[in-house]
């Protein structure tokens, strides 16, 4: 962070320049002196970390012209003017042009100190605010992508801006499609690490040996890439699906984290998929690693718990798709809105985006209903046919069981193919099969 402590002093009289400079330097400011306004103008850009004290009467460009030029580049730069004794009209004109204040010659050093202090405080405040706004506008853009007005989503957007500023590792938990990956990107973009490396490694996609190799190396001579933990140095390492992190990789990761200094050179954002009422991330990771990773914790609520956000999201995404396909967005009837609000959305926002897209296409063709889309949502892992009198969770579970069962049968017990098709990490698939009493041997 640049110190905001500079004073540019402009006066054509050398004695005057020097005495002002000495006095202010004694008060702890960093001074620089210029005999000509033209020279000062060259260094006084909009980010100048301080203020200006300038004489008015000078050969060449005078103080008033300088003031005008400075105000044109940075209207918030405080400029203190020095006027000749009794030159009131000049002083009034300077104030009208936006001078911070004026000092009449011969001036009282204490009054000068006081003025300079006020001007410097104003400058600091302004530059701080500017820095903050700049951060928010870059990180802010991606945070704005997180739609929703529910209390949870509003909190989340604020949390991201706060967490983005801090350095601790972060654990993000939530069901599939709730926005975990999007939040991880937002965290990176909202903080000091924006613009630094952002490396993604999926813990479910690699076998334990390749995963350890990708994360920590050692790399062979012919390899172009650094191990992920090095590659992400100064930035963020996004570890997807940490619920699939094999034990041996967990211990190595813990060791690496313990060896890193504070603040951590590589910030880890760990993403954990889990469904409510099932195993939580804490159950998949060794406790010491869990507590290291979960220094900061973000838990994303499932869509069905975000109230009206479902409709907000639906209309926003149908507008986007309508734009893309060059047609109108469907206008929902009350009944359709109710159906959307009540649907269980097991695939969460991702599923909702799919349905919104298909609703737009349907609307363009002029056929089909929202209800049918909600029912025939075949692209998703889950599919709920609502019967009366059964708790939702049971519908979801019976469908899930049926789906895994069908898929296992089609792939003759090949776990890898089923993982691919259902986009499930191995561990989750194993868990679910155990839960539903499905055995691989039965499909071979
Ligand atoms: N609050 C939100 N507002 C707008 N779009 C969202 C929101 N949350 C998620 N999305 C969008 O929904 C889709 C799914 O989000 P994302 O991929 O981040 O979910 P995820 O939790 O990482 O899912 P998975 O567990 O399958 O990896 C993305 O297209 C994302 O941009
Ligand atoms: Mg994701």
Image (spheres, rainbow, N blue to C red):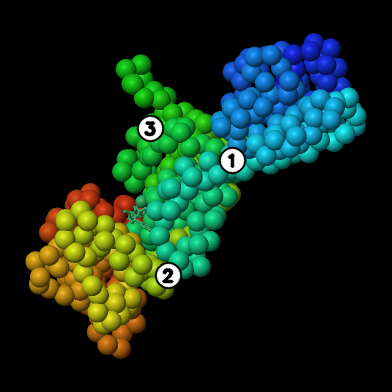
Dot 2 surroundings within 10 Å: few (below 14), some, or many (20 or more)?
Answer: some
Is 247 positioned to the left or the right of 112 in the image? Answer: left
- Would residue 67 be seen by someone viewing this image from the given angle? yes
Q: Quadrant of residue 110?
A: top right
Residue drawn at (39%, 68%) of the image: 309
Instruction: Give the mark nearest the N terminus, 1 or 3.
Output: 1
Instruction: Give coordinates of residue 361: x percent, y percent.
Output: 14, 63
Q: Disc 2 vs disc 3: which is toward the camera?
A: 2
Residue highlighted by disc 3: 214
Q: Residue furthest bottom?
A: 389
How many labels, in total?
A: 3
Cα–Cα span, label 2 and label 3: 37 Å
Residue drawn at (65%, 41%) of the image: 126
Residue highlighted by disc 2: 306
For numbered disc 1, what is the local secondary structure?
Answer: helix
Instruction: Give coordinates of residue 1: x percent, y percent.
Output: 64, 31
- Would residue 395 be seen by someone viewing this image from the given angle? no
Q: Which mark is residue 130?
A: 1
Cα–Cα span, label 1 and label 3: 40 Å
Viewer-side residue, 74 vs 380: 74
């Amino acid at each position: 962070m640049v110190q905001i402590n500079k004073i540019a002093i402009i006066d054509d009289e050398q004695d005057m320049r020097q005495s002002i400079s000495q006095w202010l330097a004694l008060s702890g400011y960093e001074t620089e002196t210029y005999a000509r306004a033209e020279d000062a103008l060259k260094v006084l850009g909009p980010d100048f970390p301080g203020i200006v004290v300038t004489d008015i009467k000078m050969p060449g460009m005078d103080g008033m012209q300088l003031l005008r030029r400075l105000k044109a580049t940075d209207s918030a730069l405080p400029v203190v003017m020095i006027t000749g004794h009794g030159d009131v009209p000049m002083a009034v004109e300077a104030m009208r042009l936006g001078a911070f204040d004026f000092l009449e010659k011969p001036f009282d050093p204490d009054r000068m100190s006081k003025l300079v202090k006020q001007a410097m405080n104003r400058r600091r405040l302004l530059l701080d605010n500017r820095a903050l706004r700049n951060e928010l506008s870059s990180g802010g853009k991606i945070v704005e992508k997180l739609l929703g007005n529910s209390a949870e989503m509003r909190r989340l957007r604020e949390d991201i801006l706060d967490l983005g500023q801090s350095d601790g590792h972060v654990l993000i938990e939530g069901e599939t499609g709730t926005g975990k990956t999007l939040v991880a990107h937002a965290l990176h973009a909202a903080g000091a690490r924006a613009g630094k490396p952002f490396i993604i490694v999926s813990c479910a996609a690699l076998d334990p040996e390749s995963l350890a190799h990708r994360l920590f190396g050692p790399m062979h001579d012919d390899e172009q890439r650094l191990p992920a933990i090095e590659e992400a140095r100064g930035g963020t390492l996004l570890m997807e699906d940490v619920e699939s992190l094999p034990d041996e990789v967990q211990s190595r990761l813990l060791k690496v984290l313990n060896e890193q200094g504070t603040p951590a050179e590589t910030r880890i954002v760990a993403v954990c998929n889990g469904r409510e009422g099932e195993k939580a991330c804490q159950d998949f990771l060794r406790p010491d690693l869990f507590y290291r990773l979960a220094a900061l914790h973000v838990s994303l609520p499932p869509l069905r718990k975000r109230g009206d956000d479902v409709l907000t999201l639906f209309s926003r995404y149908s507008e986007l798709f309508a734009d893309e396909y060059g047609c109108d967005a469907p206008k929902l009837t009350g009944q359709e809105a109710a159906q959307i609000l009540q649907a269980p959305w097991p695939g969460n926002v991702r599923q909702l985006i799919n349905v919104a897209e298909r609703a737009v296409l349907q609307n363009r063709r002029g056929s089909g209903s929202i209800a049918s889309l909600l029912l025939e949502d075949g692209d998703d892992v889950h599919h709920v046919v609502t019967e009366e009198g059964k708790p939702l969770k049971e519908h979801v579970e019976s469908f899930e069981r049926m789906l895994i069962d069908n898929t296992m049968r089609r792939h003759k017990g090949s776990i890898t193919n089923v993982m691919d098709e259902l986009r499930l990490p191995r561990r989750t698939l194993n868990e679910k099969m155990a839960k539903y009493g499905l055995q691989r041997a039965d499909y071979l």
